[in-house]
Image (cartoon, grey):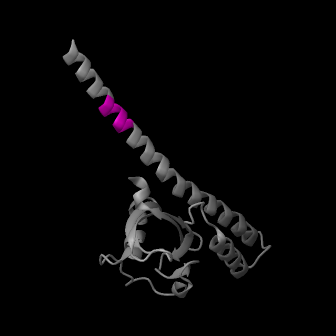
């Protein structure tokens, strides 16, 4: 009887551990995805004004960049925009990157991170998760990050939001 009880308890604990970790991973991934989807809704709303001729394309893009540059999650995570041609459209934390060519931008681990981000989206129907190393301004060293990416096709813009990969553990 004690053996059966022990096996039952062990089975229960294994299943509980698996279910809880699986649920936790899904919940943690939902935050950046929801954040990007919300930012995407803002972009589509402003772009609609452009399509209805209420704004010029340039004015709509500038308004979107202004809105996105000020969006933050509670933990300080931010959004940025690069395009499918690998040019940084907006990086609110590192504005020196704005307008730069990202084709040869490497992570500390030697990965062409923006090239790989775009490749990941091409494989995943224009939405993807990507892990890489990056330092936030308040961080002394690069840390593993996870980004959720989504393409806004009319302008070829890639909307990104990152979170510390450590949040997944």
Q: Which residues are magenta?
A: 13-19
Specify whether residue 14 is painted magenta.
yes
Q: Position of residue 34 (x, y in %)?
A: 57, 54
Q: Position of residue 147 (x, y in %)?
A: 46, 64
Choose between 118 and 70: the one closer to the eye: 70
Specify whether residue 83 is painted magenta.
no
> Residue at the location (48% across, 51% down)?
28
Q: Quadrant of residue 164?
A: bottom left
Q: Quadrant of residue 122?
A: bottom left
> Residue at the location (53% across, 88% down)?
96
Q: Position of residue 114 (x, y in %)?
A: 42, 75
The answer to whether any part of residue 163 appears in the image is yes
Against 49, is 26 above or below?
A: above
Q: Is residue 143 left or right of residue 35?
A: left
Q: Is residue 45 left or right of residue 32?
A: right
Q: Position of residue 36 (x, y in %)?
A: 57, 61
Q: Quadrant of the N terminus?
A: top left
Against 98, is 125 above or below?
A: above
Q: Is residue 6 left or right of residue 142?
A: left
Choose between 86 and 53: the one closer to the eye: 86
Against 66, is 38 above or below?
A: above
Farthest residue, direction left: 3
The count of marks equals 0
Farthest residue, direction top: 1
Secondary structure mostly seen in magenta is helix
> Residue at the location (62% across, 63% down)?
39
Q: Quadrant of residue 66?
A: bottom right
């Amino acid at each position: 009887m004690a053996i059966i009880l022990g096996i039952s308890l062990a089975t229960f604990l294994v299943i509980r551990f698996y279910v809880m970790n699986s649920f936790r991973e899904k919940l943690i991934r939902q935050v950046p995805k929801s954040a990007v989807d919300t930012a995407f809704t803002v972009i589509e709303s402003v772009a609609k004004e452009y399509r209805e001729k209420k704004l010029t394309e340039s004015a709509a893009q500038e308004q979107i960049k202004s809105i996105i540059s000020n969006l933050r999650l509670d933990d300080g995570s931010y959004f940025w925009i690069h395009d499918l041609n690998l040019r940084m459209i907006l990086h609110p934390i590192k504005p020196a990157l704005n307008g730069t060519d990202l084709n040869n931008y490497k992570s500390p681990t030697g990965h062409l991170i923006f090239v790989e981000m775009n490749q990941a989206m091409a494989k995943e129907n224009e939405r993807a998760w990507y892990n890489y190393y990056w330092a936030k301004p308040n961080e002394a060293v690069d840390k593993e990050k996870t980004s959720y990416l989504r393409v806004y096709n009319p302008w070829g813009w890639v909307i990104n939001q990152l979170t510390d990969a450590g949040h997944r553990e």
